[in-house]
Image (cartoon, rainbow, N blue to C red):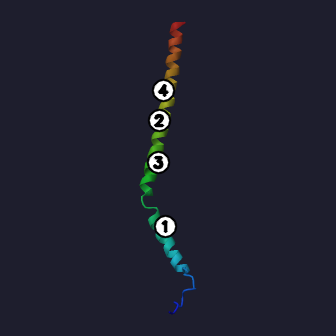
Amino acid sequence: MTEHPNKNNPVTLGCGTLILIGLIVLIFGNNGTQELDRKIDQLNKDVQELKTLNQQQNEELRQLKNMVETLIN
């Protein structure tokens, strides 16, 4: 029985192969993230709008409280 001549030689990847693998991962690795980024941006805008509305409501409540206290006194 004869041994395969490359049995003791490890398989190596050349620089070009590694660059090609990197490009493939770069191109296909970000697939779908643009939609996720858009949704996150929209969510951040919605949260900011809610914060603003909450601040407005708090100010209105303070004004109403002051009006009620003025009427009571």
How many angstroms separate mark 4 from mark 1 (CA)?
47 Å
> Is residue 34 shown above or below 67?
below
Pointers 1 and 3 in contact (CB under 8 A)? no
Which type of secondary structure does the marked residue at label 1 adopt?
A: helix
The image quadrant of residue 34 is: bottom left
How many angstroms separate mark 3 from mark 2 (CA)?
14 Å
How many angstroms separate mark 3 from mark 4 (CA)?
24 Å
Task: Give the residue type at disc 3.
Answer: Asp
Task: Give the residue type at disc 4.
Answer: Gln
Q: Which mark is residue 50?
A: 2
Mark 3 — residue? 41
- Image depth: mark 4 or mark 1 in front: 1
How many angstroms separate mark 4 from mark 2 (CA)?
10 Å
Locate residue 10, reporting x and y percent. 57, 82
Mark 3 surroundings within 10 Å by alpha-carbon count, few (fewer than 14), some (14 through 19), many (20 or more)? few
- Image depth: mark 1 or mark 3 in front: 1
Q: Nearer the N terminus, badge 3 or badge 4?
A: 3
How many angstroms separate mark 2 from mark 1 (CA)?
37 Å
Which type of secondary structure does the marked residue at label 4 adopt?
A: helix
Task: Give the residue type at disc 2.
Answer: Leu
